[in-house]
Image: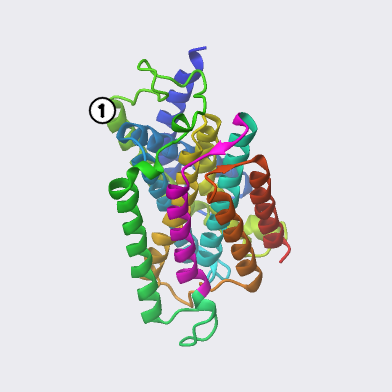
Amino acid sequence: MSASPASRFHWTTLAPPIALVVLAFSWGRHPGLVAALAIGIFLIGAVLSAVHHAEVVAHRIGEPFGSLLLAVAVTVIEVALIVTLMVGGTGNTSALARDTVFAAVMITLNGIAGLSLLIGALKYRMAVFNPEGAGSALVTVVALATLTLVLPRFTTSSPGPEFSSAQLAFAAVASLGLYGIFVITQTVKHRGFFLPVEAGRGQEIPEGHRDEDDDGHADPPSTRAALASLALLLLGLVAVVGLAKVESYPIEDAVDAVGFPHSFVGVVIALLVLLPESIAAARAAARNRVQISLNLAYGSAMASIGLTIPVIAVASIWLEGPLVLGLEPTQMVLLLVSVIVAVLTVVPGRSKALQGFVHLSLLAAFVFLAINP
């Protein structure tokens, strides 16, 4: 029925300005439980609407630019949540950036990718993607994770799993440089490696997703609609940043109330900001566009490291206390296993449902061990 698209349009249009009104009334206050839950609903609504409008703009500019824009938009939200919690948090926030970035890497490598592979394989018997594009993205994620999350555990210039000032500056510049080079590779040099390959491999395009030209892709929105979505995207990001600041105390209080380790705050942040990304990837996989799903998964992991670490490095100039980036031994084992499984999944260029289940099992292990370290 036509009512559904209309209602979805009105909901995503109204969410950003309403979230800004809620932000104006709640700014500077420490909300109670009921108020925090209500604000949390508006925060999630702002996140979902922001990513929806990012998808609209992304559809207008085309792939792989769309996946890139969506990943950057989600990372802006993630950085905002990390910085606001590090500034306004009540507990020990020295490892918050590490915990959040690592959680984002595990959720993207195992959760988003695993769910997409599972959906694609169950619906179309095999999930098909381009190993050149997915492999290039994966190797960049591995290099970024090693430079920023593994090496601090083994350096000796500073006590503990920390970088010295010079090492942190190098890691920030190297991360930003690697991410920039990948973006050029994805959007200019080898753009074709990151486009859907289902039509070229004999996979059937699902009914209901063809345009008038019968090319398997819906027509892009008009320039006016794309500009309106861009404006609403900016409003949504402002609302998310502000409401995240308001919710910083309730998030920590909720984690402490249920008896979880304080480090689980990072997992909550990552789950929150990557929820709409997960939905977008699952939708793409259901349309037999698993390459787009992997672009979203690996692109979000790259953006999470390549953009978050430089911002946190600059913010650390004003933040008090140490900045712990080195992973714990259990986290390094999970990262190593996830990388090995991801490589074995990507190399063939197609995947059975089994690989999706394996990735999701690793995600479940990560969440369980985050609660019971």
Q: Measuring 59% from the left and 54% from the top, which residue is drawn there? A: 344
Taking the image as shown, residue 177 lies to the left or right of residue 71, namely left
Q: Is residue 129 visible?
A: yes
Q: Residue 240 appears at what percent x and percent y?
A: 44, 46
Taking the image as shown, residue 140 lies to the left or right of residue 339, namely left
Q: Residue 266 appears at what percent x and percent y?
A: 57, 59
Q: Residue 157 appears at what percent x and percent y?
A: 45, 87
Q: Measuring 53% from the left and 33% from the top, which residue is drawn there? A: 283
Q: Main secondary structure of the magenta part?
A: helix
Does dot 1 land on a helix, a strand or a loop?
A: helix
Q: Residues within 10 Å of mark 1 (few under 14, many from 20)?
A: few
Magenta stretch? 124-150
Q: Which residue corresponds to mark 1?
A: 223
Q: Residue 201 appears at what percent x and percent y?
A: 48, 33
Q: Nearer the viewer, residue 289 or 239?
A: 289
Q: Would you place residue 98 above or below residue 1 in this image? A: below
Q: Nearer the viewer, residue 51 or 211?
A: 211
Q: Is 139 one of the magenta-colored residues?
A: yes
Colouring style: rainbow
Q: Is residue 36 visible?
A: no
The furthest residue to the top: 1
Total marks shown come to 1
The furthest residue to the left: 223
Q: Would you place residue 154 above or below residue 248 in this image? A: below
The amino acid marked with disc number 1 is Thr
Q: Nearer the viewer, residue 332 or 133?
A: 133
Q: Measuring 71% from the left and 66% from the top, which residue is drawn there? A: 373
Q: Is 56 one of the magenta-colored residues?
A: no
Taking the image as shown, residue 191 lies to the left or right of residue 350, namely left
